Amino acid sequence: MNKKSLEKEEIDLIKKRLFKEGFKHVSFSTYFEVENEFKKFYLQFLKEKKEASLSYLQNIKAKFNIKEIYANTNTIIAASFFYHNQKVKLALKENPYKIASYAWGKDYHNVLKKRMKRVVKDISAGRIVTDSTPLPERYLGRKLNIGFIGKNGMLINPENGSYFLLVFALLERPLSSDLILENKKANIEEDFKKYCNNCSRCIKSCPGGAINSDGIINIENCISYQTIEMRGKVNCSNIKKNKWIFGCDVCQMVCPYNKKEYLNNDTDFYPSDISLDVSKGHLENIKDTHLFGTALKRAGIEGLRRNIKSKIILK
């Protein structure tokens, strides 16, 4: 496969094709080493044991080295995809149980990876990644100027908000030397001061009190963790009653940067019949196989039933 440098004309074509696939922001970077500021922040998160049972978050070897994800990485492409839409907003308003906005339609892992692959498969050998490896995705999104990292841990675009997913292409072909720019520092504390300032809406509104003012998230108290990742009973001791049975959008809903919503009309993210049944509490005839091809499969049908029956959901 072609290993010549990626020139401006080719990069412009890649961007054009990615925009046509529905991506909103696209950014390129040459390979770089993860900087010490991020390492320090992440190690503090682990030191405080905020990762709950997510032991894979302890894989700092891969978290701090992009080439552990793909050894021959020379170029990184980051692209954002906004998933929120009017039909999901209506479903969240009308139905008794709530599902995180990204999870009503098709499984985003499959959708976004396929779209990125269609664009880059004939350009370079590499690996397409979206939320399934230790790659520090929000940090990379910050480095590639897709957005800033807010107090709620989300990557937020100042103009378009935070209702987006990230997909990355780690490519073997290098960028042309005249296109290599110095990456911006991803100093999380500086982001808080510049963009979040004294705002504490996400901290005050989080139903589990999972968000700390220093940006370190106590995952065990996060509803998304409780309803998706955790096995066994839901820990209700620190969580206010709510109707979220798969994930949670509260910290995004109250964020001032989402006041002017950027809504997408991509049908892959419209509510499916299965997600609508789940949001109505009609789980009697649903099996795990019915959840295949959706993000809901992560919790499984028994997990969804457990969530509906938990004390944080029941009145």
Image: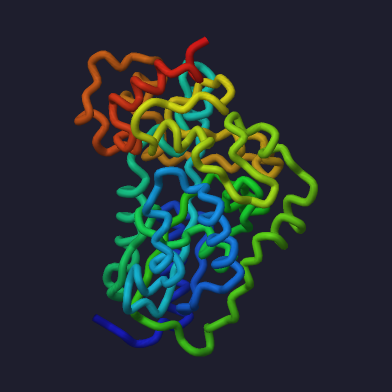
Residue at 70% in and 47% down? 213
Q: Is residue 197 above or below residue 18?
A: above
Residue at 56% in and 51% down? 48
Q: Is residue 205 above or below residue 49?
A: above
Decide if residue 264 is in sight here.
yes
The quarter of the picture where residue 45 lies is bottom right
Seen from the viewer's position, the closer of residues 217 and 262 is: 217
Q: Is residue 1 above or below residue 152?
A: below
Q: Position of residue 63 (x, y in %)?
A: 43, 64
- State how the image is colored: rainbow
- Looking at the image, the residue that sits furthest to the bottom is 177
- Looking at the image, the residue that sits furthest to the top is 315
The quarter of the picture where residue 191 lies is bottom right
Seen from the viewer's position, the closer of residues 297 and 24 is: 297
- Looking at the image, the residue that sits furthest to the right is 198
Q: Is 36 situated left or right of 293 in this image?
A: right
Q: Position of residue 221 (x, y in %)?
A: 53, 35
Q: Position of residue 72 (x, y in %)?
A: 32, 79
Residue at 66% in and 32% down? 205
